[in-house]
Image: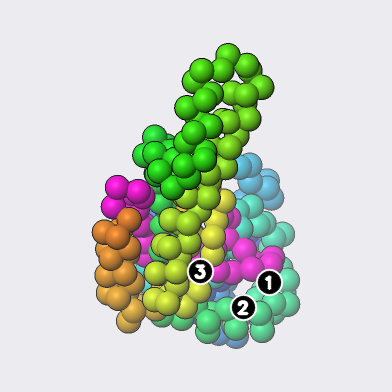
Amino acid sequence: MGDAACYVYAVVGREVSVGDAGVAGAPVTTVASDGLAAVVSPVGEGRVRASRAALSAHERVVEAAASTTTTVPLQFGVVLPSRAAVVDDLLQARRFQLAHLLGVLDGKAEYRLEATFDEQRAIRVALDGDPRLRRLVERRKASPAYGDRIAVGEAVAGAVGRVTGAWAEAVLDHLRPHADASAVLPTRRPEMALRAAFLVEQAARAGFDAAVDEVAAQLAGHLALHLVGPLAPWDFVGGAVAGDGR
């Protein structure tokens, strides 16, 4: 690999073998220093463009490492000029931060949950809980005024937001006691009431799964829950070593 620039995927507490090829099909190896190791691959031009293939390769390599050992994911696109720079500018310069993160994350994995709702169902629930708004909606049907329609539409949207927000909070309240940490993530679609990540100890996995099943049953007909994991702890590392937040 010589003095080629290094694309850096993650930091681990020991050297690992990642069988998959990395970004641009490059071989994946590790650079080790004093009990830490960076998962890297060579990049000829010293830069990596954010393509779907590159992002997928980044995620694949990090997840492969996380399946075998505690892993601190790096954000997509981290390139250092040489293997020596990986040691000096990452493993040594951020040694205490990285060692602390590896300790905090040891034995834990991320689980990501999405909760979606049916808009018409949410509207019915919102109107059932607000007779005044229901009367406004009925009056709107008889009013041709554009301004009235807009005002009532905004009122309904606000009520739906409050209803679905309460459902989302119920999910969080039920699951947070079963996780070491949680993070509410940006939602990606209008029908998504909640997108959240949970950091769960391996020994607590069964209890967390049971809690997901319980709250899914409690909110059946209101929210549909979709859980993915175990994953690398993308959403539980901060600052310059943050995950890419997919």
Coloring basis for residues? rainbow
How many C-alpha atoms fall within 10 Å of the one at disc 2: few (<14), some, or many (≥20)?
Answer: many
Marks 3, 1: nearer the viewer: 3
> Could you tell me how far apart the alpha carbons at marks 3 and 1 are, in whole angstroms?
27 Å
- Can residue 109 be spotted in the picture? no
- Which badge, 2 or 1, comes first in the chain's sequence? 1
Q: Residue furthest top?
A: 144
- Which badge, 2 or 3, comes first in the chain's sequence? 2
On screen, 218 above or below 150? below
Q: Amino acid at mark 2?
A: Leu
Circle 1 SS class: helix
How many C-alpha atoms fall within 10 Å of the one at disc 1: few (<14), some, or many (≥20)?
Answer: some
Q: Which residues are magenta?
A: 220-246
Percent of width and height locating residue 219: 32, 56
Percent of width and height locating residue 137: 50, 30
Nearer the observer, 153 or 139? 139
On screen, 14 above or below 25? below
Q: Amino acid at mark 1?
A: Leu
Circle 3 SS class: strand
Residue found at x 39% / y 39%:
124
> Could you tell me how far apart the alpha carbons at marks 2 and 3 are, in whole angstroms?
20 Å
Percent of width and height locating residue 237: 59, 69
Instruction: Say which residue label 1 marks.
Output: 90
Instruction: Judge whether residue 228 is colored magenta.
Output: yes
Marks 2, 1: nearer the viewer: 2
How many C-alpha atoms fall within 10 Å of the one at disc 3: few (<14), some, or many (≥20)?
Answer: many
> Could you tell me how far apart the alpha carbons at marks 2 and 1 are, in whole angstroms?
9 Å
Instruction: Say which residue label 2 marks.
Output: 98
Q: Quadrant of the N terminus?
A: bottom right
Instruction: Say which residue label 3 marks.
Output: 182
Circle 2 SS class: helix
Q: Amino acid at mark 3?
A: Ser
